[in-house]
Image (cartoon, grey):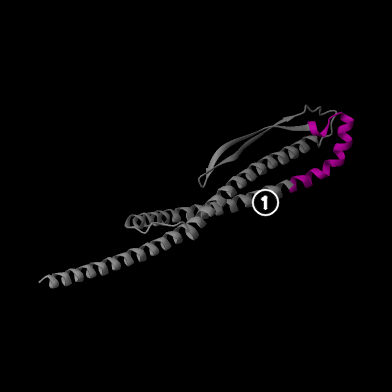
């Protein structure tokens, strides 16, 4: 703990600081609670997107062998069937934190010759698009989670700083300064009495 001056000005300064910390602390605690709630909300959304991805992957597995045979015959590569060209996002604000939000996924499909390709290809392309869209959404949600988690970490540190360091430190400084001022006042009164007594003695000796 830093050494503080034991003066009335220092006492006022410590009281003002403690009042400021106590005024800000509830706001920080509320922000911390909001961030915790938003982090939990985003965690749930990420788990949901992950589960949906797994469901799409299960659907794709039914076509894996077909991809490796029929597409080779038709001269169309699986990687070229559907291509993600752009993920459109915007910025939103969650609990005071600027975060990216998913808007749209844009795809490009390879030209399909419906006479030379199998009938299930259109369905497979839809599933591939769905899978890539879900992955794009999940990645943006993970960005949100990272940004919210970082803000939660900083806010929690500030709450702990005010609650466990700054406010107790001010209280202790105020206690020490009050004792010192009280001792100084008592000593001053004692010195005044002694001076008054000596003055009385001197007056008596003169008379």
- Give the residue at mark 1: 47
Examine the residues drawn in magenta and state their main secondary structure: helix
Side of 19 where 198 appears, left or right: left
Q: Nearer the viewer, residue 32 or 166?
A: 166
Q: Is residue 10 left or right of residue 197?
A: right
User: Residue placed at 63% from the left, 43% from the top?
Assistant: 143
Spot occupied by residue 158 in the image (x, y as percentages of width and height) = 51, 53
Query: What residue appears at the point 70 percent right and 42 percent down from the top-left corner?
Result: 135
Q: Is residue 206 left or right of residue 80?
A: left
Q: Tally the marks.
A: 1
Residue farthest toward the front in the current orientation of the protein: 206
- Choose between 172 and 82: the one closer to the eye: 172
Task: Name, please, the residue furthest toward the left.
Answer: 207
Give the residue at x 13% y 73%. Answer: 204
The answer to which of 50 and 110 lies nearer the viewer is 50
Above or below, 84 against 159 in this view is above
Q: Which residues are magenta?
A: 54-80
Question: Where in the figure is residue 115, as x and y percent of width and height?
Answer: 84, 28
Residue 80's spot in the image, x, y percent? Answer: 79, 31
Left or right, residue 168 beside residue 51: left
Q: Is residue 53 magenta?
A: no
- Which corner quadrant holds the C terminus? bottom left
Q: Residues within 10 Å of mark 1 (few under 14, many from 20)?
A: few
Residue 77, percent from left and from top: 83, 31
Q: Picture quarter containing residue 110?
A: top right
Q: What is the secondary structure assignment of the residue under circle 1?
A: helix
Quarter occupied by residue 14:
bottom left
Membership of 60 in magenta stretch:
yes
């Amino acid at each position: 703990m830093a050494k503080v001056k034991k003066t009335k000005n220092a006492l006022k300064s410590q009281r003002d600081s403690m009042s400021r910390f106590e005024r800000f602390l509830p706001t920080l605690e509320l922000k911390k609670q909001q961030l915790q709630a938003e982090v939990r909300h985003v965690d749930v959304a990420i788990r949901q997107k992950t589960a949906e991805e797994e469901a799409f992957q299960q659907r794709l597995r039914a076509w894996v062998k077909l991809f490796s045979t029929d597409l080779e015959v038709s001269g169309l590569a699986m990687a070229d069937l559907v291509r993600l060209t752009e993920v459109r996002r915007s910025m939103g604000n969650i609990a005071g934190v600027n975060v990216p939000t998913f808007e749209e996924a844009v795809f490009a499909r390879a030209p399909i010759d419906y006479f030379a390709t199998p009938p299930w290809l259109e369905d497979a392309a839809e599933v591939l698009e769905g899978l890539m869209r879900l992955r794009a959404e999940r990645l943006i949600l993970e960005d949100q989670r990272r940004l919210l988690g970082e803000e939660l970490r900083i806010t929690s540190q500030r709450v702990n700083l005010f609650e466990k360091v700054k406010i107790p430190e001010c209280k202790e400084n105020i206690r020490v300064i009050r004792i010192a001022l009280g001792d100084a006042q008592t000593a001053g009164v004692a010195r005044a009495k002694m001076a008054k007594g000596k003055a009385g003695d001197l007056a008596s000796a003169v008379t």
